[in-house]
Amino acid sequence: MTATIWWTIAGCTVVTAIIKGIGPVALGGREIPPRFSGVIAFMAPALLAALVVTNTFALGDHWTVGAHTVGVAVGGLILVRRGPLVLAVAAAVAVTALLRAVT
């Protein structure tokens, strides 16, 4: 690995530590207001949804719909209908593999 990559990793580490430290320093041991707690609670699911959408629809530097998109949709549909997670993953994999084999 080049020195540039290591400096980038080190920089990201320092920035992440600073961002994580801002909250405790700014609050100084006080309780977080309920309004902010609600926002913080929704940040992780929003980030996860953004990552899933990006990995589902992005191929390189453009958006696309393919077999993997249909597989994720099938798995999501099973989860929305309160199906088990293992079934959703298995169905998503099976549908994706089947569509890739056909095309």
Image: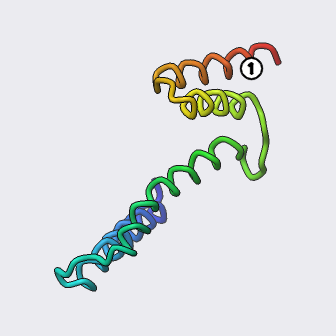
- In the displayed structure, does residue 63 sit left or right of residue 77? right
- In the displayed structure, does residue 21 sit left or right of residue 15? left
Q: Residue at x 46, y 26 (%)?
A: 85
Residue topped by disc 1: 100
- In the displayed structure, does residue 90 sit left or right of residue 43? right
Q: Is residue 80 above or below residue 88?
A: below
* Coloring scheme used: rainbow
x and y percent of residue 32 in the render? 28, 76
Residue type indicated by callout 1? Arg
Q: Which residue is drawn at 79% across and 42% down?
A: 64
- In the displayed structure, does residue 82 sit left or right of residue 16? right
x and y percent of residue 100 in the render? 74, 20
Give whichever of 76, 58 is nearer the camera: 76
Packing grade of label 1 (10 A; few <14, some 14-19, many >=20) is: few
Q: In which quarter of the image is residue 23?
A: bottom left
Q: Which residue is drawn at 48% across and 53% down?
A: 45
Q: Quadrant of residue 72?
A: top right
| Residue farthest right in this picture | 103
Secondary element type, mark 1: helix
Give whichever of 33, 76 is nearer the camera: 33
x and y percent of residue 96 in the render? 68, 22
Give whichever of 68, 83 is nearer the camera: 83
Q: Which residue is drawn at 58% across and 45% down?
A: 52
| Residue farthest left in this picture | 29
Q: In this view, does 103 lie above or below 18?
A: above
Q: Is residue 2 above or below residue 54?
A: below
* Count of numbered tags: 1
Quadrant, the C terminus: top right
x and y percent of residue 7 in the render? 42, 67
Q: In this view, does 15 lie above or below 64?
A: below
